[in-house]
Amino acid sequence: MKNLISSTIAIAIVLATFTSCNNSESSNGKSGALSSNVAEKVYVAPGEYDSHYAFLSGGYSGNLTVYGLPSGRMFKEIPVFSQFPTSGYGYSEETKPMLNTSHGFIPWGDSHHPDISQTKGEIDGRFIFINENNTPRIAKIDLKTFETTEIIEVPNSAGNHSSSFVTENTEYVVAGTRFSVPVPQRDMPIKEYKGNFKGALSFISVEPETGNMDIKFQVLMPGFNYDLSHPGRGKSHGWFFFTTYNTEEASTLLEVNASQNDKDFIAAINWKKIEAYVNAGGGTMMPTNYAHNVYDEHTHMATSTMKKEVRVVNPSEVPGAVYFLPTPKSPHGCDVDPSGEYIVGNGKLSANLTVHSFTKMLDAIEKEKFAGEAYGIPILNFEDVLAGSVEQPGLGPLHTEFDGKGNAYTTFFISSEVVKWKLGTWEVLDRQPTFYSVGHLTIPGGNSGKPQGKYMFAMNKITKDRYLPTGPEMEHSAQLYDISGDKMELLLDFPTHGEPHYAAAMRADLIKERSQKIYNLEDNKHPYAAKTDADTKVVRKGNEVHIYMTTIRSHFSPDNIEGVKLGDKVYFHLTNLEQDFDVPHGFAVLGQNSSELLVMPGQTKSSVWEPTKVGVWPFYCTDFCSALHQEMQGYIRVSPADSDVPLKWSLGEDIE
Ligand code: K7E
Ligand code: CUA
């Protein structure tokens, strides 16, 4: 492997050198002219805007990062599945419920595939969804506020990887399981996996107006690994496609035992048919447990509800809804072209890239030409559904995206390159090295019927020598290419955060116009909000002390508090009275272990503090908000548990 990678790098460097010399327009044969020409293509002058947003999954950071293209500048990290002290997400009383699951409070996640909501097959920029792989969940981020507003746990799933991809009107966000498990979970010998474990494919409905998610049904499939998925679109709208591996149903040493079969499958699911069955009362309600967490932007609070049952459907109940398309060999990515006709199976261990035809698939189903069946699910003949194959395009294909002009772009992990090829003729048109070992790639509008051409970026697993070293670990690296011409042109390297398996990107205009500037203070329905200084107070309820506090440049109200005792649980409820764009205030008190808070204009956030020592402790604003930000501070006095210091608070006068 090491040798392979180093020789790949050597080839890559040779190729890169060759390319630069070749394209150079300068008379001295050096690449200066090329560099400045390329620099112009990614240069966004100070104060000007990027043309595209890119949302990169954070992998094991559990979050989502926001970038601008073509500059590659990072704008924001949106906390999703992980506690985030930068904003207080997952630490504040309001957001803790977002991280609740049937396994209790889980402070982290492993996110892989963001996908933007769609209307009529086009990206609409309303919401972005992302999966959590480890403790299966799907999150929704509202692109008006760039806040995570909903997280739903996915029961009966394990390794929620073939997720989260949306259908062309966002009817569903779909979540498939990578690991099959006993369904329902129970104590049983691992060696009885084969034939007994199940793979749940979950169809989570998205309410058109509100975006509210609900698990409509789960299809309980044979115990394979469901790796990636994509929706049908256009003519194949109503179907969903999942790659599988480990059709051998091995439970140990999968690197050998799951690579035995010459072909695994792409599972084709006619979800419209199953939906109709379910709407007519079909399926079975199965007792289970999963959390559904919703953030309300008026109360500024999240609530977590435990759901008790889920509807499951066995494929045998709905004849004609599920088929298997033989696909060589342990396919990873499952990608559908913008027309909906071609389904690309990226066989990791296959020499050729296999492309299936949706039309041929329907035809073979119509004629009932089956090669056999697996657990009652018909298997189609490979030759009957094959549209064509790209012959020996590279080594280790992982993922494919499309430019909407009839071209496809596939990443090759082992040969470290992106290969452009033509749909229909299957000829290779171009190849460009990546640095190094590319995983996913993204074209804006990638998972839609209307890709938004021009740029493609590759997300690479190994960074090595691309930047100044930062110790043994380097952040992963992305490479931006211009794909508007016949040949791909490398424009830019930029570092990414965590492991950005996949990214969703789109033109900036739609999101930019809808972006919210403040929360309206009048609409604030938080039960502990103080909307004017007159509403501020301190209330004791047994050993709980609730401080209703406001912030405005440049003070807290109140800023002197006495009467708190050891053993008290002190809740600071901060309402930011500002109504100007981008003027948050922060809050932190000495010894606080629940993280600071960053409170947006018009918002209320709460932090709990359990003082451990008697004394007079300062609190301050953590965000440099004005020329007098350093003056934005106060004191809270903590007395012994048996003290009789009365509860008092003030601003601008001494507590007497
Ligand atoms: Cu990294 Cu899509 Cu999780 Cu391939 S996956 S690389
Ligand atoms: Cu408010 Cu600094």
Image: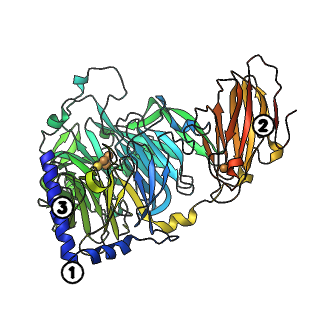
- Cβ atoms under marks 3 and 1 closer than 8 Å: no
Identified at 20% across, 58% down, the residue is 355
- Sequence order check: which comes first, mark 3 or mark 2? 3
Most extreme residue toward the top is: 642
Between label 2 and label 1, give the one nearer the viewer: 1
Q: Dot 1, crowdedness within 10 Å: few (<14), some or many (≥20)?
A: few
Q: CA distance from mark 3 to mark 1?
A: 21 Å
Camera-side residue of 579 and 215: 579
The mark found on residue 330 in the picture is none
> Which corner quadrant holds the C terminus?
top right
Q: Is residue 472 left or right of residue 123?
A: left
Up/down of 640 relative to 531, above or below: above
The mark found on residue 28 in the picture is 1
Q: Is residue 276 visible?
A: no
Please provide percent x and percent y for residue 345: 22, 53
Q: Secondary structure at mark 1?
A: loop
Q: Dot 3, crowdedness within 10 Å: few (<14), some or many (≥20)?
A: some
Please provide percent x and percent y for residue 541: 76, 26
The mark found on residue 13 in the picture is 3
Amino acid, disc 2: Asn
Residue that badge 2 annotates: 560
Up/down of 146 relative to 40, above or below: above
Amino acid, disc 3: Ile
Identified at 49% across, 43% down, the residue is 214
